[in-house]
Image (tube, rainbow, N blue to C red):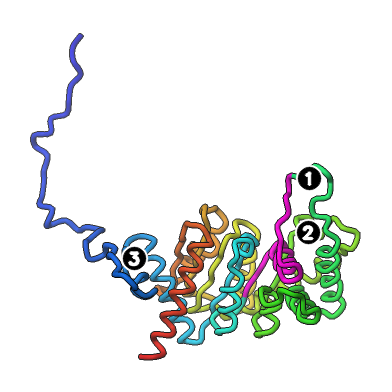
Amino acid sequence: MKPHTQLDLSKVRTYSVTERENKVETAAFGRVLSEGASFTDFFDSLPDILAGRDLRAIVDAIVTAKKSNKKVLMTMGAHVIKVGLSPLLIDWMQRGILDGLALNGAGAVHDSEVARFGQTSEDVGAGIKTGLFGMARETGEFINGAAILAHKNNHGFGETLGQALLDENPPFLDLSLLAAGQKYGVPVTVHVAIGSDISHPQPSMDGAATGAATFSDFKIWANSVKDLSQGVLLNVGSSVLLPTIIEKSLAVTRNLGHDVRDFTGVNFDFIQHYRSTWNPVRRANELSDGQGRGISITGHHELTIPLLIAAVNQQLVTDQHR
């Protein structure tokens, strides 16, 4: 059998590596920390490559936004509460860094259970078998009662839940995002997909009231989004529901004449999904005149978010002392 013909490489053109534009230089490498190094030393020692560079860009965007009195908004899945990050976000509210927080219905469930009982997150598998999954009476009555009250008073769902927690003063109130939002004047909104939360199958559920309450919260959230230009929008751990809330709030505010653009849109998640890549990441790029951008950070929230928050806090403190 005749052998196959091989391509002759003898005339391939080459050039010097010194003439090439390279993506990685040693100046961007990580540095070894000395014993007793500070957090600033640690953060500065991270490689200035890929996610290390992107994380620095997010920190810079948030710090710049706060110095310029621009909005920093966050949409957040309930898992962020379950991995213990509420105290850090409450601190951000108290510092005036976080200007608005949007939760899904599960976020309200876990937040209120943490505040009232100091624990949350049941064993779904065991509860499904017995038919008792999601049937915790206290949680259902509290959430559904707040929805009815919000509808009656034409108030937001999140603010009504927050005020109810403040009025009740449960043992772990200081760990509630809803209560902190009400306390510090930060809009915390609750965006419900009816049928998806444990409070919905219970006898205390009022679908009309819940729909009206969460609709009020959409309008409260959109009122914050209209001022997002030159600000920062962080989506943390919501793959579908809250990214669609972002999309519709951008659409309606622009429809009403608010030219929202040039914001930094960031998605933090341990898997990058379709909807959350579009909203806010690609949407930030679409609505940019050169000042906005979209960034994705992949990793566990319990690691990436404390790192982000500590870096922002430290940078703001450092800049105040300059």
> In the orientation shown, which residue stands out farthest toward the right?
203
Magenta segment's dominant SS is helix
The location of residue 309, given as percent across then percent down, is 49, 73
Disc 2 + disc 3, Cβ < 8 Å: no
> In the orientation shown, which residue stands out farthest toward the top?
1
Q: Secondary structure at mark 3?
A: loop
Between disc 2 and disc 3, whose residue precedes?
A: 3
The residue under label 1 is which amino acid type?
A: Ile
The residue under label 2 is which amino acid type?
A: Ile
Q: Is residue 218 above or below residue 320?
A: above
What's drawn in magenta, residue-wise?
101-125
Q: Taking the image as drawn, is residue 267 in sight?
A: yes
Q: Is residue 139 left or right of residue 119?
A: right
- Quadrant of res 180: bottom right
Q: Is residue 197 left or right of residue 256?
A: right
Determine which residue is flagged by label 2: 194
